[in-house]
């Protein structure tokens, strides 16, 4: 028997050795497995929320504020479309609509004279759109043409009553037009209408194609 085998023989346990008695203290806190997992998850969630609500520079807490989106509120205009249309009467349209929008709702008849209207013209509240048949004569009460253009009203010769036939022009505005030409002389351009009290850009555009000098 060599030395290595002899050492293994001497160190092999015989089963008669004395065992060292060790007493382990009882644990102070006992946490079941499932509740422990819940506690750990809650702690991780709390740490994550805390880190998310801090910025990267000064470490200050972010203040959350609910911001309401502004709601755009647009006005409306009420106009009347009469004459050669399938759906005559009053209609309510969004502010900024044009004569073309009103005619689309009114549905002109096949023989309606659409060339008599500037369909790009802005609508004003209280405006009346008279759609006539092609070749029809102007209705009674409409003043004679100005500047050689059919259907236009002369700013320098029309009476206050005749001026009220213009879109958006009531008695007060018509009186202001007459007073302006009496105080400053005849109009030299239709753009001078915007110098009259009560006539702004929208109302001027509504009547521009229907006035002359």
Image (cartoon, rainbow, N blue to C red):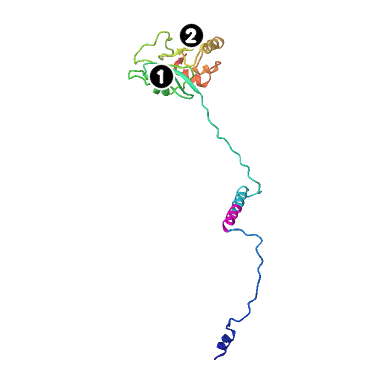
Query: Disc 1 vs disc 2: Cβ atoms closer than 8 Å?
Result: no
Question: Which residues lie in the magenta part?
Answer: 33-43
Q: Which residue corresponds to mark 1?
A: 117
Q: Is residue 139 above or below residue 29?
A: above
Query: At 55% across and 88% down in the image, what residue appears?
Result: 5
Residue underneath mark 2: 161
Vertical placement of 23 versus 98: above or below?
A: below
Image point (52%, 16%), residue name: 193
Q: Is residue 49 above or below residue 95?
A: below
Question: Residue 118: where, in percent of width, then height?
Answer: 42, 21
Picture quadrant where residue 139 is located: top left
- Please identify the quarter of the rendering in which residue 149 is found: top left
Screen quadrant of the N terminus: bottom right
Task: Tell me where residue 3 appears, x and y as whole percent.
Answer: 57, 89
Q: Is residue 116 above or below residue 12?
A: above
* Magenta segment, prevailing SS (helix, strand or loop): helix
Residue that protrudes farthest toward the bottom in the picture = 1
Residue 34 percent across, percent down from the top left: 56, 56
Label whose residue precedes the other's in the sequence (1 or 2): 1
Residue 202 % position (x, y): 50, 21
In what element is the residue under mark 1? Answer: loop
Q: Is residue 204 left or right of residue 25?
A: left
């Amino acid at each position: 028997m060599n030395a290595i085998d002899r050492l293994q023989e001497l160190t092999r346990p015989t089963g008669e050795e004395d065992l060292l008695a060790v007493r382990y203290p009882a644990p102070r806190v006992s946490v079941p497995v499932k509740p422990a997992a819940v506690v750990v998850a809650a702690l991780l969630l709390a740490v994550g929320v805390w880190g998310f609500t801090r910025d990267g520079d000064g470490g200050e807490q972010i203040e959350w504020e609910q911001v309401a989106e502004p709601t755009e509120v647009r006005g409306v205009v009420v106009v009347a479309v009469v004459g050669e249309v399938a759906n005559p009467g009053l209609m309510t349209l969004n502010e900024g609509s044009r004569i073309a929008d009103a005619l689309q709702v009114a549905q002109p008849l096949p023989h309606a004279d659409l060339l008599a209207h500037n369909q790009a013209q802005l609508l004003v509240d209280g405006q009346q759109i008279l759609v006539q048949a092609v070749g029809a004569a102007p209705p009674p009460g409409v003043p004679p043409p100005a500047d050689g253009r059919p259907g236009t009203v002369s700013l320098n010769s029309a009476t206050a009553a005749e001026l009220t036939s213009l879109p958006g022009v009531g008695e007060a505005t018509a009186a202001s037009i007459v007073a302006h030409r009496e105080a400053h002389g005849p109009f030299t351009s239709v753009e001078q209408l915007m110098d009259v009290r009560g006539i702004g850009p929208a109302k001027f555009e509504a009547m521009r194609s229907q006035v002359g000098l």
